[in-house]
Amino acid sequence: MASKYVQVYTDLKKKIENRELEIGQALPAEAELMSRYQVSRDTIRKSLGILENQGYIQKARGRVATVAGRGNYTFPFERIASFKELNAHLDRRTETKVENLEIILDQDRIMELFEDDEEKEIYDLLRVRSIEGERVIIDHDYFKRSIVPNLPLRACRDSVYEYLEKEQGLEIGYATKEIYVQEADEKDRKYLDLREYGFVIVTKSYTYTKENQLFQYTESRHRPDHFRFVGIAQR
């Protein structure tokens, strides 16, 4: 079971992301939060400190915390979230452009991506994400067609996960993730508005169903000034 401060942090974060607490809205006072969650003042302060560090709230000495309008995306490593879900808390204009959607039959390429010699076809989906008119993310996804037989363009433009979960009944379980810095390549220069940046932040992830079936491989490439990657470490 998660520590009490993690439970409080998670609950408040969900309320902010679900817009139960709106940008600019004051959080309850510490005493009220202590009573609501039945925890100590130190626990509440630790939870609020994490929220502040991640950009969810703003705190000032002697004043209650308020929900912040976050300028940067915070990519959580402890959960799987779609671009649409991450957008929910951000008061910014965003756009997803599908650059490519095709079916790959090349068995060598499929083996290279999934190490699966039984998979016959995969979807190759390339999307570029824009924030306030600037192209700042490349998402390159591959899906096994044995698990994702159909992938309509409307879902690619909106939310693939929402389509898979709500329309196809797929139960997404967990993902393994890797993050590193890489020098910008030709594709980055083509699809991203890099400004002065000569490198990108790369995240690779393998996503599994609740039955432990690998169904998706993703490589995301991010312009570095827009993003922070966060998680909670416990001892």
Image (tube, rainbow, N blue to C red):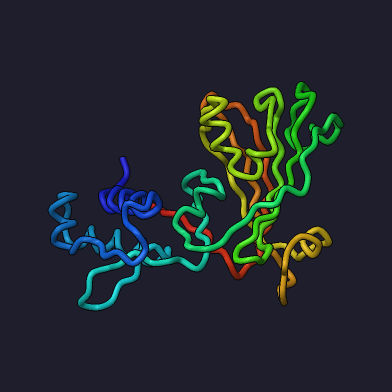
Please report the residue visible at 76 percent of the width from the left and 65 percent of the height from the top: 184
Q: Across the whole image, how many numbered discs are drawn on residues?
A: 0
Residue 61 versus residue 203 in the image, above or below: below
Is 22 displayed left or right of 27 in the figure? right
Residue 128 versus residue 23 in the image, above or below: above
Q: Quadrant of residue 107?
A: top right
Please report the residue visible at 21 percent of the width from the left and 62 percent of the height from the top: 42
Is 66 displayed left or right of 136 in the figure? left
Residue 120 versus residue 95 in the image, above or below: above
x%, y% of residue 175? Answer: 56, 40
Is 1 displayed left or right of 83 in the figure? left
Please report the residue visible at 59 percent of the width from the left and 47 percent of the height from the top: 177
x%, y% of residue 209? Answer: 56, 29
x%, y% of residue 14? Answer: 36, 49
Q: Quadrant of residue 121?
A: top right
Locate the N terminus by quadrant. top left
x%, y% of residue 210? Answer: 51, 27
Viewer-closest of 8 and 58: 58
Viewer-closest of 117 and 55: 55
Please report the residue visible at 32 percent of the width from the left and 51 percent of the height from the top: 20
